[in-house]
Amino acid sequence: MTSSSENTPKTKPAPAQPESLIEYPSQFPIKVMGLKAEGYVHAITVIAHQFDPAFDAATIELRESKGGKYLGVTITVTATSREQLDELYRTLSTHPMVKVVL
């Protein structure tokens, strides 16, 4: 009589995956899109400062949509961890003025 462990194929453990492909700290650009409205850029700037106190608002890049209804805002933050970036994306994505975060 053979035990069931003898019939179980042996598998190699999967190689460890790196936790992140990003080296921290690093400069990390984030594109945020929303309706072009008063206070929109300021709201994005406030959120950026919450997650990166050294955020420089002078580095913000703006791009209007072809029809002028939407505004793309690119912020570059100093990323210090995966958790920081995840929470920043979550905060931006749930802001009522934001439509898309990339």
Image: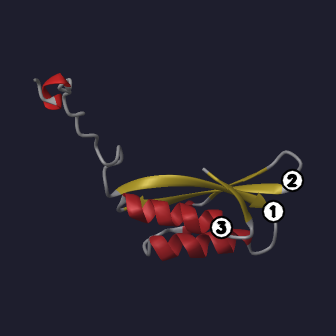
Residue at image location 44% in from the left, 75% down from the top: 53
Of label 3 and label 2, which has the lower sequence position? 2
Q: Against 19, is 25 above or below?
A: below
SS class, disc 1:
loop
Q: Is residue 82 left or right of residue 66?
A: left
Quadrant placement of the N terminus? top left
Residue at image location 35% in from the left, 43% down from the top: 21
Q: Which residue is mark 3?
A: 94
**Which mark's residue is nearer the viewer, 3 or 2?**
3
Residue at image location 53% in from the left, 69% down from the top: 48
Q: Using a 10 Å C-alpha cutoff, classify the residue at mark 1 as few (fewer than 14 neighbours), some (14 to 19) or many (20 or more).
A: some
Q: Against 24, is 54 above or below?
A: below
SS class, disc 3:
loop
* Residue closer to the observer: 61 or 79: 79
Of label 3 and label 1, which has the lower sequence position? 1
* Residue closer to the observer: 70 or 83: 83
Coloured how?
A: secondary structure
Residue 24 place in picture, x, y as percent: 31, 55
Q: Which residue is mark 1?
A: 36
Query: Of the residues shown, which amino acid type is indicated by label 2?
Result: Gly
Residue 58 place in picture, x, y as percent: 56, 65
Q: Are marks 2 and 1 in contact (CB under 8 Å)?
A: yes
Gap in angstroms between the C-alphas marked 3 and 1 = 17 Å
Residue 99 place in picture, x, y as percent: 73, 58
Residue at image location 87% in from the left, 56% down from the top: 69
Query: Of the residues shown, which amino acid type is indicated by label 1?
Result: Lys
SS class, disc 2:
loop
Q: Are marks 3 and 1 in contact (CB under 8 Å)?
A: no
Q: Which residue is mark 2?
A: 68
* Residue closer to the observer: 63 or 24: 24
